[in-house]
Image: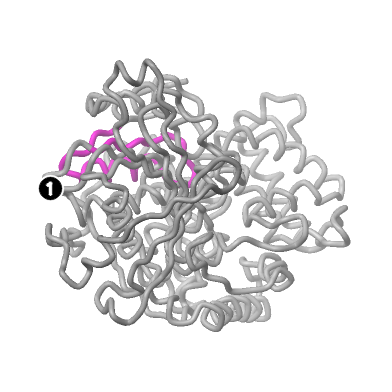
């Protein structure tokens, strides 16, 4: 999912890559995703994303005329590279190399009877920063058999991500330092430390990424997808995007409505929100997920947080305060658990209910003085490897977010003024998430995007999937996006966790698979449980 600042799109649970999804929010009331059943209209000043001309501009013709050379790679998959302009407005200025992977369709008698191969199905796991190449390689073996029989599954690492001219910013040891810096400063010294860490991160990205740092926006990534669509030989794009992948997919639909095939946007984002509203409502989303976790925990014999939601919140606050005062020892090579890492560990577990047992155990250990469990959850959030290295997930995440929307805050004073509203949205995490959003204030490249609606007039039906207690992309966002899209169809999963397709619900899976295979979307307002 997507957020501006440190709240990352990490855990890619459906593919088993890291752990959950990406970053986003819920209503400022803090009442939870279900409470936001009637999201309001976008602010009057928000404009609609305008489509690009239907004809490919002559200066881009060479990019659309490339021939893909697929080569065996990665244990049975096929990989290829192709070129796109660094700047679509100035294609003569240079190119970027992008990498894609393909799992060819597995045809059979059933597929032949059903009409044979449909085409390519692009997948994106979210982020920004999640590798679609790795996602396809992990997901292909367990993807629905009917879909696998009739589609080539294709993963394109967006520009700046994974194997596609990746953005890098800090070394592993400096990332360790960055993730441990407190993001809820109690005094000016701690404010200065947080600002210094954010500035070091931004400067590292500027030094290592160079001019490409200004050209990793979602609009440019969507245009890259259209180049790949053409090179694959598909007249229309079929696509499943999760979390931030919904923003990428909706952007594609807005720019190229006439080339929309079968689009599934699961764990949807609302593109009409500015970065302040997005971060604030995301805080409310995590509050909703925390309430669900606390309620579930109270029923468990191994719950270390008591027997009521209020007691759980009080005990969590007391534990985090103790960690702030004295970081906890861990069994990981002398590393200690900081307050920031402890909070991040809790947030990581909100992405998926299968992580809740790990969180209960980690909190039990932390109360006994061992921070190892919470540190492992925090490391999973950032994608830290056992050798201390980090993937480019967080670097790309921040680079894309800081381009897509203007920074929510210009400096610490802006954060201080916003904290009460964030705490209203999320009593447990609001303060943390307000300060987490400071990073883009020091970004070396000016934002090129702004909040907007996506209508995609004339597009084929687009399925938008929303989970009622999604921590990262609140249900209200799915409602909003489905309402903006002229052809949007909202499919609701009444449940917990980040995203729904391919996770818990046969009802959701059946509706999505039927749409992908026949083009028939679910009826408007369809609701599913497990």
Nearest to the observer: residue 385 or residue 371: 385
Front residue of 278/419: it is: 278
Q: Is residue 204 visible?
A: yes
Residue 287 visible in the shown view: no
Q: Classify mark 1: helix, strand or loop.
A: loop
* Crowdedness near tag 1: few (<14), some (14–19) or many (≥20) residues, C-alpha within 10 Å: some
Q: Nearer the viewer, residue 448 or 271?
A: 448
Q: In which quarter of the image is residue 104?
A: top left
Q: In this view, does 117 lie to the left or right of 435?
A: left
Q: Residue at x 48, y 82 (%)?
A: 210
The answer to whether residue 84 is magenta is no
Determine if the magenta segment contains residue 481. Answer: yes
Q: In this view, does 233 lie above or below 192?
A: above
Q: In this view, does 198 lie above or below 280?
A: below
Nearest the eye: 176 or 137: 137
Q: Which residue is drawn at 54% across and 65% down?
A: 436
* In this picture, residue 163 sits left or right of residue 106: right
Q: Name the residue under label 1.
A: 457
Where residue 266 appears, x then y in whole percent?
38, 39
> Does 19 sit left or right of 9 as displayed?
right
The percent coordinates of residue 513 (x first, y second) are 36, 26
Residue positioned 40% across, 68% down in the render:
216
Does 93 sit above or below residue 118?
Answer: below
Give the residue displayed 31% in from the left and 75% down from the top: 87
Marks counted in the figure total: 1
How far across and how far down the image is residue 170, in percent?
A: 63, 74
For the magenta stretch, what is the residue range? 462-490
């Amino acid at each position: 999912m997507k957020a501006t600042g440190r709240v990352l799109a990490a855990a890619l649970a459906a593919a088993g890559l890291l752990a959950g999804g990406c970053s986003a929010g819920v209503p400022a009331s803090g009442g939870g995703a279900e409470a936001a059943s009637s999201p309001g209209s976008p602010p009057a000043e928000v404009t609609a994303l305008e489509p690009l001309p239907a004809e490919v501009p002559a200066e881009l013709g060479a990019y659309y005329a490339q021939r893909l050379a697929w080569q065996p790679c990665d244990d049975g998959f096929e990989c290829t590279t192709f070129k796109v302009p660094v700047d679509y407005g100035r294609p003569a200025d240079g190119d970027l190399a992008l990498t894609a992977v393909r799992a060819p369709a597995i045809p059979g008698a059933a597929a032949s009877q059903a009409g044979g191969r449909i085409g390519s199905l692009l997948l994106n796991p979210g982020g920004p920063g999640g590798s679609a190449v790795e996602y396809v390689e992990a997901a292909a073996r367990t993807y629905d058999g009917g879909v696998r029989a009739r589609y080539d599954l294709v993963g394109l690492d967006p520009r700046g991500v994974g194997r596609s001219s990746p953005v890098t910013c800090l070394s592993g040891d400096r990332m360790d330092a960055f993730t441990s810096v407190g993001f809820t400063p109690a005094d000016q010294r701690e404010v200065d430390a947080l600002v210094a860490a954010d500035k070091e991160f931004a400067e590292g990205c500027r030094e290592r990424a160079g001019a490409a740092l200004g050209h990793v926006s979602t609009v440019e990534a969507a245009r890259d997808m259209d180049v790949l669509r053409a090179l694959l030989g598909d007249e229309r794009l079929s696509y499943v995007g999760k979390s931030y992948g919904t923003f990428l997919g909706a952007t594609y639909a807005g720019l190229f409505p006439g080339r929309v095939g079968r689009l599934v946007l699961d764990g949807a984002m609302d593109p009409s929100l500015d970065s302040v509203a997005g971060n604030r409502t995301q805080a409310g989303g995590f509050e909703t997920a925390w309430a669900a976790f606390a309620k579930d925990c109270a029923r468990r014999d191994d719950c270390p947080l008591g027997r009521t939601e209020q007691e759980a919140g009080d005990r969590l606050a007391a534990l985090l305060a103790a960690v702030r005062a004295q970081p906890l020892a861990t069994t990981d090579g002398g590393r200690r658990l900081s307050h920031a890492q402890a909070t991040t560990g809790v947030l990581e577990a909100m992405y998926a209910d299968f992580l809740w047992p790990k969180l209960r155990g980690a909190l039990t250990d932390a109360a006994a003085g061992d921070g190892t469990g919470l540190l492992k959850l925090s490391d999973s959030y950032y994608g830290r490897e056992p050798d201390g290295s980090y993937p480019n997930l967080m670097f790309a995440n921040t680079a894309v977010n800081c381009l897509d929307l203007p920074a929510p805050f210009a400096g610490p004073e802006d954060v201080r003024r916003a904290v009460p509203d964030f705490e209203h949205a999320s009593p447990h995490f609001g303060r943390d998430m307000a300060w987490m959003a400071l990073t883009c204030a020091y970004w070396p490249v000016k934002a090129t995007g702004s909040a907007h609606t996506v209508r995609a007039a004339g597009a084929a039906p687009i399925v938008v999937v929303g989970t009622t207690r999604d921590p990262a992309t609140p249900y209200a966002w799915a409602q909003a996006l489905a309402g903006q899209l002229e052809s949007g169809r909202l499919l609701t999963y009444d449940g917990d966790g980040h995203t729904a397709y391919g996770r818990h619900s046969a009802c959701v899976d059946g509706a999505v698979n039927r749409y992908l295979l026949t083009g028939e979307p679910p009826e408007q307002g369809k609701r599913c449980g497990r």
